[in-house]
Image (cartoon, helix red, strand yellow):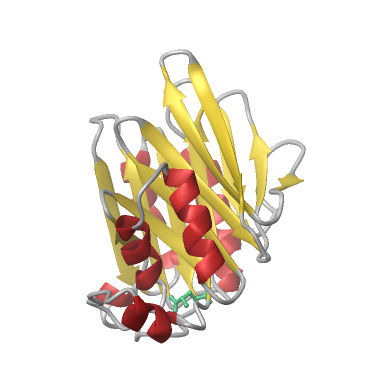
Amino acid sequence: MCGVFGFMTKDGRGPDLARLKRIAAVTQQRGHHAFGLAWLGGDGRIHTYKRPGPATANLAALDACRGATIVIGHCRWATHGRPEDNRNNHPHPAGRGWFVHNGVVQNHHDLVQKYRLAQRTQCDSEVLGLLMARFPGALGLRAARVAERAEGRLVMLGVWRNPARLLVVRNDNPLSFGETAGGYYFASLPEGLPGCVTEIRDHYAGVLTLGDDGLRHEAFLIAG
Ligand code: GLU
């Protein structure tokens, strides 16, 4: 089962890169087939990185996240789609955003047929992004509706820009967060997270938006 991790700034400053590298190395326990990142840089653009191989062979890639306001990361345990074909690895696109996924979309073939989705990879996770791009409405609402249609336990983290937004979705797979003065750190495994670590509530799709007056939080329920 893969692992995810992430960071969201509170004050516009970037993550503690040493901490993020420790969190990535811990998360690798849950998957070493590929490593991937997406981040919203100080330049206001979303950047991505993904490669076959374990997190610990790719930790230097995190140096590019200096000054990033949002980071999402993925340590892949491939279930669908060979990691040697980098298109199968995470992050995957979701409209104008990018996301990482932990879980198996057990009905992904049915979803492709039902919604006539144009798959470009062999990875089941891709359909979540294609569906997110298809559905109307606010980001958190769309994510909740997608999670309701996907059979199987899942966690997703996603990054969008204008405004800067972190998507956090938990439906039966583990996800926790810890807080520092500068921001929030998220991970599948709690070891390595700062401060008083808290589990994300289950059946939850939330969006953290960075505005001029700090962070705003919206939450949606994933119906059973
Ligand atoms: N099914 C996804 C993949 O193959 C996620 C794997 C997992 O979470 O174990 O990339």
Q: Hey, which residue is sitting farthest top in the picture?
A: 213
| Front position in the image: 121 or 203 | 203
Q: Quadrant of the C terminus?
A: bottom right
Left or right: 50, with 196 as reference point: left
Left or right: 15, with 62 as reference point: right
Residue depicted at x 34% and y 42%: 160
Residue depicted at x 39% and y 74%: 53
Q: Is residue 25 visible?
A: yes
Q: Position of residue 149 (x, y in %)?
A: 51, 69
| Front position in the image: 93 or 39 | 93
Residue depicted at x 60% and y 53%: 187
Q: Is residue 83 visible?
A: no
Name the image quarter holding residue 206: top right
Q: How many marks?
A: 0
| Front position in the image: 58 or 83 | 83
Name the image quarter holding residue 210: top left
Q: Position of residue 200 (x, y in %)?
A: 69, 48
Q: Position of residue 64 (x, y in %)?
A: 31, 44
Residue depicted at x 40% and y 78%: 111
Q: Quadrant of the N terminus?
A: bottom right
